[in-house]
Image: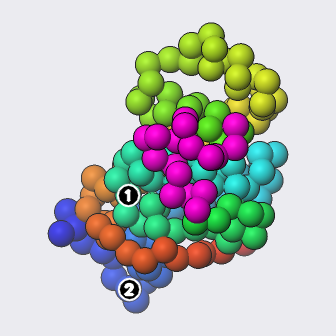
Amino acid sequence: MPRVPLPDAATVDVQRTGVLGHEPRLLRRFMELYGRLWRDGIVDHPTKEVVRLRNARVTGCGYCRNVRFAIARENGLDEGQVALIDDAYAVSALSPRHKAAIALTDVVLGRRAEVHAALAAELHAIFTPAELVELGVTAALCMGFSKIAVTLGSVPADMPVTIVPTPMPPE
């Protein structure tokens, strides 16, 4: 049951905005930042999608957990790989790049206490400093907004896997 009612469907696209449609200016600014992160970023889309999906599983966001951004799918991230983004990821068949991205995400999300020396060395061997910043920002943005949606009770408990267009900044 939503703790904040959905906005009037006559004024916003409720399917796309959820409760954030109550504050359209804030939603627009978020979508501008989020869209630029996806459009203008330097990290490959499948790796950013792995970060986004790890966050969804940790925060319990049913919407985020079941949505797939089209460009990550087009660039090779399939459901078999997505299924491995769980607590056993470290011993899974995921690529070292995706495993390292999940480990970093777990630190951002508070599941790991710190980036210890071995993880730092691994991260720096795989990612550039700019990529590490982008991955951290991706994890933080995803966490913040999915936790808002979960807290306000506006996400479905479950839904089918749905491929959606990759976010772009508003026109």
Visible in this render: residue 42? yes
Which residue is identified by label 2?
A: 9
CA gap between label 2 and label 1 equals 22 Å
Name the residue at 24% across, 71% down: 5
Residue shown at the point (62%, 38%) measured from the top left:
99
Q: Residue at x 51, y 58 (%)?
A: 83
The residue type indicated by label 1 comes to Cys
Residue 154 located left or right of residue 166: left
Toward which corner of the image does residue 4 lie, by quadrant?
A: bottom left
Dot 1 lies on which element?
loop
Q: Position of residue 59 (x, y in %)?
A: 37, 48
Where is residue 2 shown, x and y percent of the image?
A: 22, 67
Query: Visible in this render: residue 144?
Result: no
Visual colour scheme: rainbow
**Relative to 80, is 35 on the left or the right?**
right
Of labels 2 and 1, earlier in sequence is 2
**Image position, residue 48 (x, y; %):** 66, 50
Q: Residue furthest top?
A: 117
- Image location of residue 138, percent across then percent down: 61, 44
The three-letter code of the residue at mark 2 reads Ala
Q: Please, is residue 55 above or below residue 159 in the view?
A: above
> Taking 81 as reference, is 127 above or below it?
above
Q: Residue at x 55, y 37 (%)?
A: 91
The local crowd at label 1, few if under 14, some if 14 to 19, many if 20 or more residues have their Cα within 10 Å, is: many
Q: Nearer the viewer, mark 2 or mark 1?
A: 1
Q: Quadrant of the C terminus?
A: bottom right
Q: Nearer the viewer, residue 143 or 49?
A: 49
Q: On the rendered structure, is 3 left or right of 26?
A: left
The region drawn magenta spans 80-96
Helix or strand or loop: what does disc 2 sit on? loop
Q: Which mark is residue 61?
A: 1
